[in-house]
Amino acid sequence: MQRWIVVTALTTALVGLSPAAQAAPVRDGEPSGTVISLGEARIDPKIPSRVLVDATYLCSAADEARSLTVSVEQKNPEDAASTAFGSARTAEADITCDGNQQQRQFMVQSKTSNWLPDVDAVVIATVSNIGSTPSAAADSRRMRLAAS
């Protein structure tokens, strides 16, 4: 019973964070909210332990605390004990929150092994912007990491 309650609460919270639910039109003088959307993820051709992830985000309250993070996890289909994972966080000063859509490329370094081309990975991006409504958004996808 407790698991069901936790899953229901978590699902309800995540539905509130979905980018589709956040995509309200921006009117002059109104806060534009907080949204993020993942783009392509590809392995760095020079350093195979790095993956480059494209993300598009929007936030509006520049004078409040904010963060932008991307995480990647990939299991090796031939070795169940091997998982590549890593995350990248952007410094608060480097996050532009002016109500306009921004694009950023993240470099995520695997802490354990090289990324595998054409193998599924779970990619998660979050942006938070205290003072905006909503104050956070997330996007997560299962995608194949492309070789550059």
Image: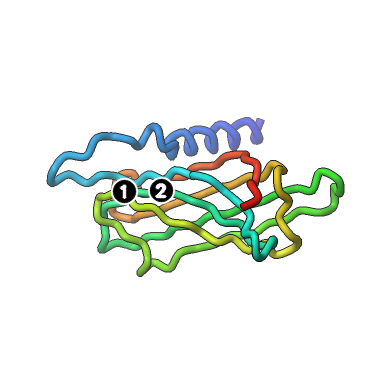
Which numbered marker is on residue 72?
none
Check the image and report above or below for 148 versus 12: below
Secondary structure beneath dot 1 equals loop
Report whether 57 appears left or right of 40: left
Residue 112: image location, x then y, percent: 74, 63
Q: How is the image coloured?
A: rainbow
Q: Amino acid at mark 2?
A: Thr
Instruction: Characterize the local packing of mark 1: few (<14), some (14-19) or many (20 or more) Cα atoms within 10 angstroms.
Output: some
Q: Amino acid at mark 1?
A: Gln
Residue drawn at 50 percent across, 49 percent down? 125
Residue drawn at 65 percent across, 65 percent down? 46
Report which residue position mark 2 lands on: 56
Check the image and report above or below for 65 versus 134: below
What is the count of numbered marks?
A: 2
Mark 2–mark 1 Cα distance, whole angstroms, equals 7 Å
Instruction: Characterize the local packing of mark 2: few (<14), some (14-19) or many (20 or more) Cα atoms within 10 angstroms.
Output: some
**Label pair 2/1, CB-CB below 8 angstroms:** yes
Check the image and report above or below for 1 versus 27: above
Which quadrant would residue 24 be assigned to in this image? top left
Residue 52: image location, x then y, percent: 56, 56
Quadrant location, the N terminus: top right
Nearer the observer, 82 or 48: 48
Nearer the observer, 133 or 84: 84
Report which residue position mark 1 lands on: 101
Secondary structure beneath dot 2 equals strand
